[in-house]
Image (cartoon, rainbow, N blue to C red):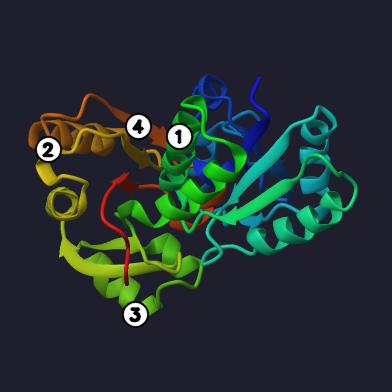
Amino acid sequence: MSTYQLTCCSTADLDLETFEKLDLKYVPFTFHLDGKDYFDDYGNSMPIKAFYDAMRSGSSPTTSQVSVGRYLDFWRPFLENGQSVLHLTLSSGISGSYNSALLAAQDINAEFKDVKVAVIDSLCASSGYGLLMSELAQKRDEGLSFEEICDYAKDLRLKIQHWFFPSELTYLVRGGRVSKTSGFIGGALHICPLMNVDYKGHLIPRQKIRGKKKVMAAQIEMMKAHALNGTDYNGRVYICNSDCLEGAEYLKKAVLDNFPKVKSVEIFSIGTVIGAHTGPGTLGLFFVGDQRVD
């Protein structure tokens, strides 16, 4: 057993098998849908397909971040077992969970002397956040100490590249992230905004592209421009999708065709909390690359 535990929030958008394989632990956000509250727990509380079908039928879910009390309950067993905890939060540019985690860590660290909780803002989201956690798990298994893994996380987080697009603007309009006028025009012209996460962890639109095939081609071009070693990239590639698996498979093939040294590309579902804001039809591409500077 390691002397420390790596933890994150459910918004890392991996899957339960990967969490178990990498010995990563997560604490769930919650969402409210059609009069009921649910945990964001990878389909256990509500199947992810049913969640997106509800959105297509007009439901408007809302989400809640992890509370201070839930963080305390989540971390305490690890500390009582003699393990320190490194917790990475969903980007502070998207959620207030980082501040809640800091408050919780301050409280619980006052109780323990030989172990502690360290909290780091991932500046990442969805399966990009998950990719960061996977890279940290590998370094933990290679023997990095607690102090070394904390430093490594801070260095790596801005090198996780996120390139994604929503194929429907309806849900961004519904959530107030796009104006009704822009949403109407974009929908009529089949505009898919190519977005990424900037160096402050905010979601930023970068290009307006007509058509899904063209925006997926643009994702591949961004990977060529930003991936570590360009088309010789041989690291992990993660793809996430919100109930649009066919598009994810198409993008996976494009990655393998253009980056022959990549050994595998893993596809994950966008969970209920991230999906509540992006809606169905969103597709993301994540890899390790150059440092985000804008």
On the image, numbered disc 1 is attached to which residue?
A: 134
Amino acid type at circle 3 is Thr
User: Which quadrant, please, contains the C terminus?
Assistant: bottom left
Residue 44 image offset from top left, x and y in percent: 63, 28
Q: Which numbered disc flags the more N-terminal residue, 3 or 1?
A: 1
Residue 170 image offset from top left, x and y in percent: 39, 62
CA neighbours of label 4 inside 10 A, class few (<14), some (14 to 19), many (20+): many
Disc 4 from disc 1: Cα separation: 14 Å
| Element marked by disc 2 | helix
Left or right: residue 77 versus residue 225 is right
On the image, numbered disc 4 is attached to which residue?
A: 267
| Element marked by disc 1 | helix
Disc 2 from disc 1: Cα separation: 21 Å
Q: Which numbered disc flags the more N-terminal residue, 2 or 4?
A: 2
User: Looking at the rendered structure, which numbered label has been put on residue 181?
Assistant: 3
Q: Nearer the viewer, mark 3 or mark 2?
A: 2
